[in-house]
Image (spheres, coloured by chain):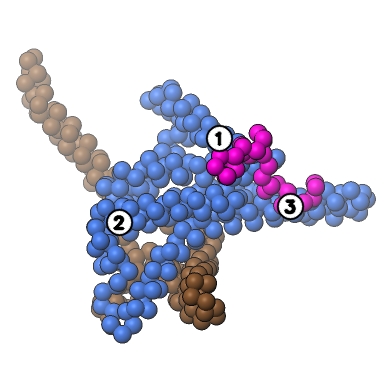
Chain colours: A brown, B blue
């Protein structure tokens, strides 16, 4: 994005019947396209939306975990309520909800979770950073 | 009443109790402020875009930044094909942001401090995610819950966990916004209450009231940050979840 712009100034003087108008139009189009790709490039590697604040990040992780446990407990209680086996499924789904909460948290921290194959292929933990978006 | 930190969240009817089919549909202060929010957004954005100056003035700058920020976010997270969701994300962000900001005015009602409002918004988002996922990928979208490469023996457990994880999204999305707004307003009110009750003692009480006074001022600044941040987080998570539905990777 540091390359100088290529103005491609027309060498020939402008003809009275606008002979170089198509050329100039094309030139303008290519310059606009170059500018646009520069803008896209400049905005791409800056994931500013992500690190908006550590405060919100922390809050997000906490709430992801709590939500997992909560939903697990609710489902378990619902199943028990219907089946009439009160403590059994509540306990089972609370544990599953615990797992879901951890999964949620790791996803929230990583944005894109690695699949099982990716995990087995992964050489070192720092490779996670390349997976972003 | 003056020191009751919960009083500000009470809902009361402004126009007498109406009933339709056994449901109460009275016009409450919450409904009034939702109307005010929509009117505020419409007013600001209409004023901001009315001049259409080449060199934007202050208000037009605000409008352009507002639009540009969400536009950037949608482009970054959803890519070009996510353009269709820009109006939705922009509306959600604007509603939550203005609701939070209006809530910072004394004596104003904070719509987003009620869990029913935030959970409704979140359920709507997740419902849309499911609809988009099914529309784009058909029934194959449910492979989302069956990650590949997992041994068959533990697959049922993993699927259950994935399903619970997915179901917990609207809960976490709604609860976070609700919790932040509720907690912030209560803390602010409690500290402000300290100032009043300590100051009423006179003498040394005035000195003692200084500390909670400073806290209240600092907390007000923090609350403005939180108000913006939570709206932003709500919008970005909407984008992230929609992205999952648009580009499901198995």
Chain containing mark 1:
B
Q: Are marks 2 and 1 in contact (CB under 8 Å)?
A: no
Chain containing mark 2:
B
Q: Are marks 3 and 1 in contact (CB under 8 Å)?
A: no
Count of all numbered marks drawn on residues in the image:
3
Q: Which residue is depicted at the point 57% across and 48% down?
A: B112
Q: Quadrant of the C terminus of chain B?
A: bottom left
Instruction: Say which residue label 2 marks.
Output: B133
Q: Earlier in the sequence, mark 3 or mark 2?
A: 3
Is residue A6 placed above or below B137 in the rendered structure? above
Q: Residues under labels 2 and 1: Cα distance?
A: 32 Å
Q: Which mark is residue B5?
A: 3
Instruction: Say which residue label 1 marks.
Output: B35
- Magenta segment includes B16: yes
Q: Residues under labels 3 and 1: Cα distance?
A: 25 Å
Q: Which residue is depicted at the point 20% across and 39% down?
A: A33
Asked whether B55 or A125 is in front, the reply is A125
């Amino acid at each position: 994005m540091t390359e100088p712009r290529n103005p491609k100034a027309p060498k020939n003087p402008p003809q009275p019947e606008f002979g170089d108008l198509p050329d100039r139009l094309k030139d303008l189009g290519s310059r606009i396209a170059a500018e646009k790709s520069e803008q896209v490039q400049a905005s791409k590697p800056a994931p500013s939306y992500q690190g908006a604040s550590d405060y919100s990040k922390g809050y997000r992780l906490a709430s992801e975990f709590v939500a997992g446990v909560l939903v697990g407990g609710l489902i378990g209680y619902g199943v028990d309520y219907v089946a009439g086996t009160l403590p059994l499924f509540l306990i089972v789904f609370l544990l599953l909800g615990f797992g879901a909460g951890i999964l949620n948290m790791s996803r929230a921290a990583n944005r894109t979770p690695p699949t099982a194959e990716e995990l087995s292929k992964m050489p070192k933990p720092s490779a996670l950073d390349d997976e972003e978006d | 009443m003056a020191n009751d930190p919960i009083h500000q969240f009470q809902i009361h009817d402004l126009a007498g109790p109406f009933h339709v089919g056994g449901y109460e549909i009275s016009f409450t202060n919450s409904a009034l402020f939702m109307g005010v929010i929509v009117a505020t957004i419409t007013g600001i954005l209409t004023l901001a875009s009315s001049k259409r100056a080449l060199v934007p003035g202050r208000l037009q700058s605000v409008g352009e930044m507002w639009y540009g920020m969400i536009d950037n976010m949608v482009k970054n997270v959803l890519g070009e094909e996510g353009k269709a969701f820009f109006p939705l994300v922009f509306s959600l962000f604007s509603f939550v942001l203005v609701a939070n900001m209006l809530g910072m005015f004394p004596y104003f009602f904070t719509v987003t401090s009620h869990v029913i409002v935030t959970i409704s918004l979140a359920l709507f988002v997740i419902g849309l995610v499911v609809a988009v996922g099914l529309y784009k990928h058909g029934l194959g979208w449910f492979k989302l819950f069956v990650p590949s490469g997992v041994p068959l023996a533990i697959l049922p457990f993993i699927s259950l966990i994935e399903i619970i994880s997915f179901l917990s999204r609207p809960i976490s999305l709604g609860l976070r916004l609700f919790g932040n707004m509720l907690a912030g307003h209560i803390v602010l009110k409690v500290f402000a209450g300290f100032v009043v009750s300590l100051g009423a003692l006179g003498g040394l009480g005035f000195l003692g009231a200084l500390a909670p006074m400073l806290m209240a001022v600092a907390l007000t600044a923090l609350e403005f940050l939180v108000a913006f941040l939570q709206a932003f987080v709500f919008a970005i998570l909407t984008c992230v979840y929609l992205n999952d539905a648009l580009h499901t990777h198995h």
